Image (spheres, rainbow, N blue to C red):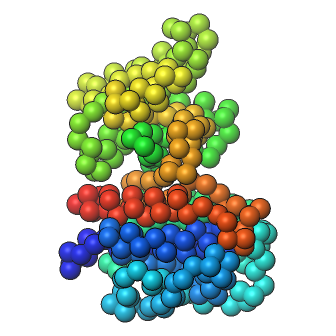
Amino acid sequence: MLPDGGLPVVAVPMGDPNGIGPEIVVKAFADATLAEVCRPLVVGDAYCLARALKACAAGLMIHKVDRLSEAVFRPGFLNLADLAHADLHKLVPGTIQALAGQCALDYIRVAVKLIGSGQADAMATAPINKESLRAAGVPHIGHTEILADLTGTRNPLTLFETDGLRVFFLSRHVSLRQACDLVTRERVRDGIRQSCAALKRLGVSEGTLAVAGLNPHSGEHGLFGDEEMLAIAPAVADCRAEGLDVTGPVSADSVFHLARTGRYAAVLSLYHDQGHIATKTLDFERTIALTLGLPFLRTSVDHGTGLDIAGQGIASPVSMIQAIRLAARYAPLYSR
């Protein structure tokens, strides 16, 4: 937290400027209740935000700041660290462009610097586009990998939270075949340790972590798949011997429901879609991603850049609002 002890400052890099990021950001900032929980600061370009304000008919004043002390944190103001990129008139909403990818990367870099200098406490990110990043020559596939590189973080952990359900992920953006190969005793053991430590850091001091099974019905004792017997159950046993409150494998067709209804504090999902489907089916708009293990807390919307509707002013800001709120909620705990 900042020395003044006030509400946490949440840096909001506005995402790919050709996508819906600028629109959901301005709509989120139009929600006056955000000022009750945090001091949000956009990192982006005034040119793009002005265009989004017009598309969304949002009555906000863009207030450019060079330092936090210049910000006006009250309803009606959109405080902006303006990067003032050149050639922004060449941006075409709804398209893949190298310029858009470079801008998105620059917003993230500046947000990280703001946190590193003590001017912000946490980060809530709008969506970026993998193809635009690639067009710009960015060697990373998404936010998590970019932030890991910028902060020197070896193995950041992803947590999804929505409507009382918390889901960690053993692997992220890899093929399903590779994800199965990554289910080893060592990796599952490390994932359990990271997840338990993350829960404590977020103030979740009680409750059991459940490890999902990989195969249908957790393999039925080797009838169809032996990963549960050879990797998951031994890893759980190792961690229980260390004093960690963990159980599993629990069949993936029931573990998320059980966690949602209070049996477990969180679930360790073994691959991307296993946990994504569970959380997004429960509440797509309010599923928020948290990146843990970084020197700071980062939350994010869990939807894409919406290129098919970009520039129309119709994108829903619900996920962006929730991401900012969650960053504000957990930032004081995470910074301890």
Quarter location, residue 44: bottom right
The residue shown at (39%, 58%) is 326
Q: Give the residue at x 67% y 32%.
A: 177
**Quadrant the C terminus occupies:** bottom left
Q: Position of residue 61 (x, y in %)?
A: 51, 88
Image side of residue 92 versus residue 106, left or right: right
The image quadrant where one finds the N terminus is bottom left
Question: Residue 223: x, y in percent?
Answer: 59, 7
Residue in the picture at 23% in, 36% down:
206
Rendered view: 90 above or below 270? below
Q: Is residue 328 left or right of residue 26?
A: left
> Looking at this view, is 234 or 1 the one in front?
1
Tell me if 259 is positioned left or right of 83 in this view: left
Tell me if residue 108 can be seen: no
Compared to residue 39, the image places residue 132 above or below, namely above
Which residue is painted at 45% across and 58% down in the image?
Answer: 322
Residue situated in front as seen by the camera: 214 or 262: 262
Between 285 and 144, the one lying in front of the other is: 285
Tell me residue 158's x, y (percent).
Answer: 47, 48
> Relative to 139, is 168 above or below?
above
**Foreground pick, 103 / 21:** 21
Question: Residue 13: x and y, percent?
Answer: 52, 73
In this view of the protein, can residue 257 be seen by the observer? Answer: yes
